[in-house]
Structure formats: C-alpha cells, structure tokens
C-alpha cells in the first residue's frame, strides 16, 4: 500500500503549524542540494543537499552505486481505495542510470536524460536499448553535474528541436553549464547549436531544470556552485532563474535590460511548474541544511539567498525580498521536479519530487484566505524521487534516483514508474 506520511511540524511564513492525518500545514524552508552530505562544509557552511533523517546523504561523487539487493516494486504498493488515492502504480522501466528529466512527446514517446550523459527514449511500451545521444567532450559528469534538464520545442512535431542543460569543463579548467538545442530525427539526436553558456557550475549546485513557459520562452534554473554571493550578483548567471527565447535571444520584456535573469537570490532551484489557470510560475529550491522552499516566482523578484532563507524577516532592502509559499522547517526535502495535476479528482494540486525526503509532496497551493497545505505520499517506498510529470491522459510519471551516489539502490533501480488513473 502507498503510505501517507504525517508531518507534524511545517512552516508557513514564520508560523508553526501542528497538524495530523498526513496534512502538512503550509510552511516549509529551503532544503540543501539533494540531501546534505555528512561532514561537508563550504565557505557558506552549507552541506550538499541535506538528507531526511531516514535518508542516506547524497555524497559528492556521481558514480552509480551498485545495486544492493531487492528492488522496490511499486506493483506491490496498490492504493487502499480509489476514492482516497486515485492512481495505481506500474513500473515502466528499470535499471536506469540516474534519470534526471523527462519530456512527453505528442506521439507518446517519453524522452529522458540520464545524468552520466545519455538521452534515451521509451516508446511503444518499451525502453529503447540504444541512446539517442551520448554527449561528447567537454561534457562533465561528477557529483550533481552532468546531463540534467531537457525540454521539447513547443513545435517539436514540425521542427524536431529539443533543448538540454549540461555541465562541461572549460578549456582553462573549472566547470560551467550550458543550454544546447538538439535536433531529433528517428533514432538519433544531434547537437544543433549552443544557446547559452558560461553558467556557473561545479560538482554540486548546478540547478539544471529547463521548461518552456506558457509564453513560449525557455526558463532555466541555475545554482550558485557554493558561492552564495553569486545569487545576489545580477551580473552573474548563478543562483538565478533565467528566461530566453528558443533562439537564445533575450526577451524584450525581461525584468533587467539585456539580461537573461528573470529572478535572483536563489540557492539551488531544481523545479519549475506553471499553474494552468493563472499562469503563475512556481519553483522548488534546496535550502542550506533544511528550510527547503516552494516559491511563487515574480519577474525581477529577489528570493533572498544568502541573506535570508525560509521565513526569516529582513530589514532595509532585505525587507523587499520574497518569502516562500511553503518551506520545510527543520526537516529536509531536497525538492526537485514538480508538476501541476490538471485532470481527475486531484486537479489543481501540485506534486513535488523529494530526494532526501524520499516522497512525493502533494501540495494544495491555497487561494484567497485558504492557506497552502501539503501531504506526503509514498514516503520511503521508492527511495529518492527526482522528478514527476503528468501525461495527456492524466497518467503521472515518476523517476527515482537511488543510483545517484546518495541512495541505496535495489536491483530494479533506477525506475520510471507510471501512476495510472483509477478515475477514468
């Protein structure tokens, strides 16, 4: 059976909430990168993605951890009742190598990246054995770096273009990230052009999510590579959410002239999702050692890192910095991919994948006087969860990341899991 975790303490802009029955009140702080690394420290005293108390910390190396025995089988985890949980879990593919992002094509194909550098596809009920693309040098995969975000062009059916975010090593040394445009035809993908490069990178804190917004522009999350000051430097691309056209140009209505920066003051944002009715942009962000955040993003907004985190109040200019919609308090989620549900009884809810938290958060964003709330699903059932997406038929797709060097992989990991609607 799936499990709903009852989270006793949550935070909503400074308020402590005690709740039961699996409902989290509405207040949570930003979590560190993918689960804190025990004993790691930086100039900002920030661990690498703090782990949940029951989760293994995510170490710096990105090498796949060999399987350690029995896999986690979602088929053995059926919901208690369709009325309480309107989906049934089914494994689509296993043995994946740290899958990071997925994109669903109009023809039913599911494209996904694996962090060590391969682009793969699931089609007609099977995982294609050979990758569409293996990224060549100067590609870099170590720690949290590698092949991360991926998005299909809004006109993919006609032009075959897709977009990818990956880490690479500079000729002069050091690591950066860049956004590529790819051309996909048949069973092959090729690099068409570099759209944006020079994004600060390192072993950890690379951000990496890319998504097309309803306005047709490409949004990009970037980390501050353990240099907190980059997040408050408008001239740096680190610690930001960026916005560019699909040709790589800067939109005329970006908040800062001739700059791809859309919002700033971020630590390591890894999720993007737009509320379908309002078009409002939400993002997930890793905090320093807890205080993981769900933010409502405004153009030009400063989200405070490293000056404030969670619901801390500032003074002077800091007073105008944006506070999160939800944060995790003293717990750690290490939130990553996220998606709004648009169909079925949970329509309007926001799902957020948690790495260190080893769960899916089902969030009701709240409207009017109603405060946001959150519910934990599948807690510790499948281990570390990297991503979640909704298909056109209402199926939800979930990716695990137990082979990322921080988890405890089973024989079936990593997995692509489908949550099939029971309400049809």
Image (tube, rainbow, N blue to C red):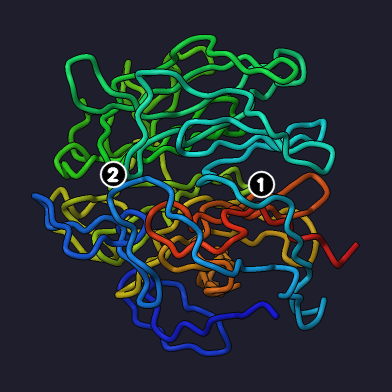
Label 1, residues with CA under 10 Å away: few <14, some 14-19, many ≥20 = few
Q: Does residue 24 lie above or below 100 as drawn?
A: below
Q: Nearer the viewer, mark 2 or mark 1?
A: 2
Vertically, is 191 above or below 179? Answer: above
Q: Dot 2 lies on which element?
A: loop
Depth check, front residue: 21 or 180: 180
- Between 240 and 395, the one lying in front of the other is 395
Which quarter shows the N terminus?
A: bottom right
Badge 1 element: loop
Q: Residue placed at 37% from the left, 68% from the top?
A: 56
Task: Judge left or right: residue 204 versus residue 45.
Answer: right
Q: Are marks 2 and 1 in contact (CB under 8 Å)?
A: no
Residue at 62 percent of width and 14 percent of height: 183
In the rendered structure, find residue 234 and report the number of the disc placed on it.
none
* Residue 254 percent across, percent down from the top left: 40, 25
Name above or below for residue 175 compared with residue 291. Answer: above
Q: Residue furthest left?
A: 43
Using residue 106 as the reference point, say whether residue 172 is left or right of it: left
Q: For the residues marked 2 and 1, what is the alpha-carbon distance in whole angstroms?
A: 32 Å
In the picture, the disc for residue 204 is: 2
Q: Is 24 situated left or right of 55 in this image?
A: right
Locate the C terminus and report the quarter of the image it occupies.
bottom right
Q: Is residue 60 left or right of residue 344?
A: left
Residue 168 at what x, y percent from top left? 33, 24
Q: Residue 387: x and y, percent?
A: 55, 51
The answer to whether one can see residue 228 in this image is: yes
Chain-order first, disc 2 or disc 1: 2
Residue 276 is marked as: 1
Q: Give the x, y percent position of residue 235.
A: 21, 25
């Amino acid at each position: 059976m799936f499990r709903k975790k009852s989270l006793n303490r949550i935070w909503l802009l400074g308020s402590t909430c005690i709740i039961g029955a699996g409902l989290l009140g509405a207040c949570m702080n930003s979590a560190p990168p993918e689960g804190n690394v025990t004993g790691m420290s930086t100039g900002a005293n920030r661990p690498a993605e703090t782990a949940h108390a029951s989760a293994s910390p995510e170490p710096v190396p990105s090498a796949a951890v060999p399987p350690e025995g029995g896999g986690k089988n979602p088929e053995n985890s059926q919901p208690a009742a369709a009325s309480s949980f309107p989906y049934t879990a089914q494994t689509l593919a296993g043995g994946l190598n740290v899958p990071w992002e997925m994109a669903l094509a109009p023809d039913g194909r599911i494209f996904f990246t694996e962090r060590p550098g391969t682009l793969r596809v699931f089609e007609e009920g099977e995982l294609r054995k050979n990758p569409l693309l293996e990224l060549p040098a100067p590609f870099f995969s170590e720690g949290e770096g590698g092949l991360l975000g991926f998005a299909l062009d809004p006109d993919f059916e006609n032009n075959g273009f897709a977009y990818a975010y990956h880490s690479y090593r500079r000729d002069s040394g050091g690591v950066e990230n860049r956004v590529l445009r790819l051309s996909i035809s048949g069973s092959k993908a090729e690099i068409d052009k570099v759209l944006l490069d020079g994004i600060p990178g390192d072993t950890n804190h690379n951000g990496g999510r890319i998504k097309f917004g309803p306005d047709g522009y490409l949004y990009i999350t970037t980390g501050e590579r353990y240099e907190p000051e980059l997040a408050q430097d408008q001239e740096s691309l680190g610690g930001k959410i960026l916005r560019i056209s699909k040709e790589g140009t800067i939109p005329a209505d970006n908040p800062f002239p001739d700059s791809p920066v859309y919002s700033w003051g971020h630590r390591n944002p890894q999720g993007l999702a737009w509320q379908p009715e309002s078009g409002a942009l939400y993002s997930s962000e890793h905090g320093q050692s807890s205080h993981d955040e769900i933010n409502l993003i405004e153009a030009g907004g400063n989200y405070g890192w490293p000056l404030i985190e969670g619901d801390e109040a500032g003074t002077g200019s800091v007073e105008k910095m944006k506070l999160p919609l939800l944060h995790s308090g003293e717990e750690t989620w290490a939130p990553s991919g996220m998606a709004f549900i648009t169909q079925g009884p949970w329509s309007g809810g926001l799902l957020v994948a948690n790495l260190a938290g080893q769960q899916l958060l089902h969030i009701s964003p709240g409207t009017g006087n109603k405060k946001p709330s959150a519910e934990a699903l599948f807690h510790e059932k499948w281990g570390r969860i990297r991503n979640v997406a909704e298909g056109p038929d209402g199926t939800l797709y979930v990716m695990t990341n137990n082979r990322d060097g921080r988890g405890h992989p089973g024989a079936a990991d990593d997995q692509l899991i489908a949550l099939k609607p029971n309400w049809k």
